[in-house]
């Protein structure tokens, strides 16, 4: 869209797509990856076959882990 002149820059593209300019930059940077790396990533298979861990779920797991670590640390200090 930028190359064709449909939009002038990444900011306009982001607005048109309803995403942040930073996200557009991230996606465009993926196009710069070495083809061998892209092939290796493709060989990993479909990540959606595995359980998806959302940020919200991960935050809960981290909180739980931190409490567990604190408890162990307190017990070993006694």
Image (cartoon, rainbow, N blue to C red):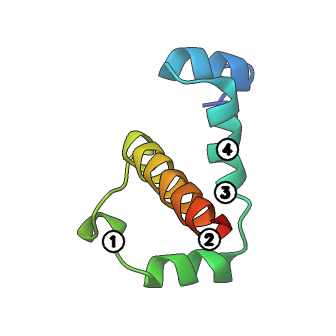
**Residue at numbered disc 2:** 76
Q: Earlier in the sequence, mark 3 or mark 2?
A: 3
Q: Secondary structure at mark 3?
A: loop
Q: Residues within 10 Å of mark 4 (few under 14, many from 20)?
A: few
Mark 3 or 2: the one toward you: 2
Query: Does the image show residue 6?
Result: no
**Residue at numbered disc 4:** 26
Q: Earlier in the sequence, mark 2 or mark 1?
A: 1
Residue 2 in the image: state x and y as whole percent: 68, 30
Q: How many numbered callouts?
A: 4
Residue 63 in the image: state x and y as whole percent: 48, 46
Image point 28% across, 69% down: which residue?
Answer: 50
Q: Secondary structure at mark 1?
A: loop
Image point 32% across, 57% down: which residue?
Answer: 52
**Residue at numbered disc 1:** 46
Residue 3 lies in what quarter of the image? top right
Q: Earlier in the sequence, mark 3 or mark 1?
A: 3
> Quarter of the image containing the C terminus?
bottom right
Tell me the CA gap for discs 4 and 3: 9 Å
Image point 36% across, 68% down: which residue?
Answer: 47
Residue 25 in the image: state x and y as whole percent: 71, 38
- Given contact means CB atoms under 8 Å apart, are the residues at marks 1 and 4 in contact? no
**Residue at numbered disc 3:** 31
């Amino acid at each position: 869209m930028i190359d064709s002149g449909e939009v002038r820059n990444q900011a306009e593209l982001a607005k048109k797509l309803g995403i942040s300019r930073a996200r557009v930059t991230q996606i465009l940077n993926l196009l710069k990856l070495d083809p061998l790396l892209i092939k290796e990533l493709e060989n990993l298979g479909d990540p959606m076959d595995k359980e998806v861990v959302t940020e919200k779920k991960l935050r809960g797991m981290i909180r739980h882990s931190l409490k567990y670590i604190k408890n162990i640390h307190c017990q070993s200090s006694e």
